[in-house]
Amino acid sequence: MKTKFHLAKRASSRYASGSSALPQGGGQAVALIDERYLGWLAQQQPSKPAHPLQRSALTVVFSGLARLCGAEGSLTRACLFTDQPPTELVDGVLLRMVPPHALDGGLGLVRSLGLELTQLASRGACSMVLIASDDERLIPYIDEAQWRGLKVVLVTDEASQDYGRLTGEDPSWARLLMQADRRVALHEAAWAALTTPGANSHMGRVHEGDREADSGFDMPPPDGPPSDEWRAQVERVIQEWWRDETPHARLDLYEEMQNSQGVPPETDRHLLLRVRRELARALSFPEKKAMREMIRETVLAQPPVVDETVDS
């Protein structure tokens, strides 16, 4: 059983009702990020990143998540809890150095993140906090912050949509997710920004029409195999993409897919985004699998013809 950390005794004045007991953050949001957890989560994605987490993308990505969760104001800052010494400083990202997990089992991180959370709640610095961590020992700190009126959102990935399965496989994480006011999943575009150098520029805005499609956790895709109507919509998107590709790009993809079993990560991410926009919702795992099979069928249907005279 994991140790729970007892907080300071609640003062009687905190039982007063009225607006004075609520945060005065004016719709602002703050992100508290466990870098070790975020890195582990990235490695669970189908396309494992070849680069470390891009700290410069944190504020852009978490600003988008805050808006998806209804934050009226901007993301004030992101606090990154890490045991890795900085090689550069990033505007809007505050580093909180904690001991390596191997030394104290994450105890220092829990205490540091928990203290930051309770201070935000007690001082009314914001109305919403996004927490990226899977440590169940944060529950008493989250409970304290919620008791003071702070909305707590836990950041996870799409695999955690199946809560029943998660309860059996990782009950500790499931209990932590149950404590949150809301859960939000990092989608493909967010992972691309966080794990690809220079890929975060397109994450700056979240369109109102894409809000539900990108929310992931809150708008679960339908169950069951893809329908014929779904296949027709996706086929149209794939054919439009294939027509727009240059002959040389088609040939490169053809040769690459001939020697592999899947779809190149860049192509996969690009088409996932296009299909999500077309459907205005997230895709289920069976739908993603079917989409990738349709991409391969389109690319490998016949060898692309390149007119070499154009280059001569």
Image (cartoon, rainbow, N blue to C red):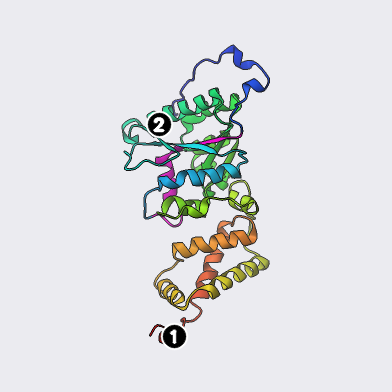
Tell me residue 132's x, y (percent): 48, 39
Left or right side of 103 for 209:
right
Q: Nearer the viewer, mark 1 or mark 2?
A: 1
Q: What's drawn in magenta, residue-wise?
A: 27-49
Q: Is residue 265 magenta?
A: no
- Residue holding disc 2: 109
Going from the N terminus, do you reach mark 1 or mark 2 first?
2
Quick one: 123 or 233, which is closer to the camera? 123
**Residue 304, placed above or below residue 240:** below
Disc 1 residue type? Asp
Q: Quadrant of the C terminus?
A: bottom left
Q: Which residue is mark 1?
A: 307
Q: Is residue 157 above or below residue 310?
A: above
Residue 220 visible somewhere in the drawing: no
Measured as percent of width and height from the top left, residue 92 is found at 45, 39
Residue plotted at (59% across, 24% down): 148
